[in-house]
Image (spheres, rainbow, N blue to C red):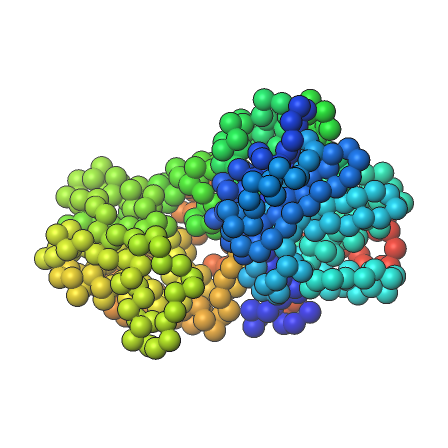
Amino acid sequence: MPDGRDGSFDGPTEKCGVVGASLADRDAARPLYYSLYALQHRGQESAGIVTHDGFQQHSHVEMGLVGDAFDTDDVDGLAGSAGIGHVRYPTAGSVDESCAQPFTVSFKSGSLALSHNGNLVNSEEIREELAGLGHAFTSDGDTEVIAHDLARNLLESDLVRAVKRTMSRIHGSYSLAIMHDDTVLGVRDPAGNRPLCIGTVEDGYVVASESAAIDTIDGELVRDVRPGELVVLHPDGEGFDSYQLVERDRPAHCFFEHVYFARPDSVIDGNLVYEVRRELGRNLWEESGIDTDVVMPVPDSGRAFASGYAEAAQDNGAGVEFAEGLMKNRYVGRTFIMPTQDERERAVRLKLNPIKSTVEGKTVTLIDDSIVRGTTSTQLVQLLKDCGAEAVHMRIGAPPIVAPCYLGIDMATREELIASDKSVEEIGDAIDADSLAYLSREAVADALGADRGDLCMGCVTGEYPYEIDGEETDREVSRPVIDGGSSAGADD
């Protein structure tokens, strides 16, 4: 595997959304379709659903947004009360149909479909081993590696033992929605790095990356899938079985799900994301509050942080006003053409326009969730000053991002990360802010009600909860043994 320090890694990393459903009296396709809409923020490159009607598998997977990938006939053609779905946003690897999911395999022991959110860091080792055993791969994604390994183990073991064997071999972050014939499963990696939850609907059960997907289909959240747990939904929709297949001393929940990636209305690991972000904002005031005329968010990512920050400021007697000072144009997408430097610099004005009466002649605190390269922050500070702001102080609801993410969130390389080689003061100077402050790591753990050691904070510490070549780890972990056969102890 390449040296991790250059930001490269072992195969595509997926910031994706997965869902699975097993219902009693109706087809699963339409609830899955609505659930994928609720998870659209987790992936915009492709969308897919695979169902099973008790006799055969039905699949529809296309590039594009959910609304573009499916029409009414596509959904109606997906028969069966069991199914899984996926939305994908690749952060590396092929951006084509070869890596679109769910990935399907037909083999002697039946049919298999698999949706994956996360990233393996030893997929190439397993791929080479399976290729040597005659497995033919059609993509460069690690999802296909998991599917082939699981299919191979299903030839030798029952469903639960097969999943346990595969979990003992794959290394990295993963939440999986799996369908073996008409049985739907949910699997979360032993560190619980990526989110996965289980919910109930009127006539069955659902697993999904976020609880907002369950809310969308009038379901009720039951609980999070535990780290290292397999849940097997009953084909009749009457319940589910739980198997704790792998135990770890400590989880490694991704804190950045709460800071940025997840929907604010989702509950992840027992925390409502919106309230976590407000608490992060309150902690940000406690650590680095400054009394300005107005506090405003960078929409939409900074809104909950700014709300909590302003509330804490007012509780402490500051005469600050919370206001929406930047209006977002929601119709400027990633395909906007910017061939010249002047047009690239103008792009921020196309996406965000200041409200002059909120800004002119006032001191401003601008709140955002993160600074990655610094380009957008520089443009926003300049935009507000051009609009007449007397001063612009920037506050960030997370610690500085100093290292890439290898585990399923899109991050830049170290060379692109402004905080990787600059102090906070130097970053403030670079973006021309009158002052700049970030939230501490301890304050993040406090807002989550978690022990710092139970979180993955690799992107802000440079130390990861997994063994990644060229990187430091913050805990004792060991890679699964890749020995060319079934993993030792997998059936214990």
Measuring from the top left, give residue 361's x and y in whole percent: 10, 57
- Give left or right: position of 111 versus 171: right
Query: Could you say which is closer to the camera, residue 218 or residue 30?
Result: 30
- Residue at 64% x, 59% y: name it: 97
Measuring from the top left, give residue 468's x and y in whole percent: 64, 63
Which residue lies most toward the bottom here?
340
Relative to 472, say whether 225 is above or below: above
Which residue lies most toward the left here?
361
- Residue at 18% x, 64% y: name it: 385
Quadrant (top left, top right, bottom left, bottom right) of the N terminus = bottom right
Measuring from the top left, give residue 440's x and y in whole percent: 39, 53
The image quarter in which residue 485 lies? bottom right
- Residue at 65% x, 72% y: name it: 2
Residue 185 seen in the current view: no
Relative to 308, say whether 298 is above or below: below
Quadrant (top left, top right, bottom left, bottom right) of the C terminus = top right
Query: Could you say which is closer to the camera, residue 11 or residue 392?
Result: 11
Measuring from the top left, give residue 392's x and y in whole percent: 21, 60
Relative to 54, say whether 280 is above or below: below
- Give left or right: position of 481 versus 275: right
- Give left or right: position of 218 versus 344: right
Residue 345 seen in the current view: yes
- Give left or right: position of 38 versus 352: right
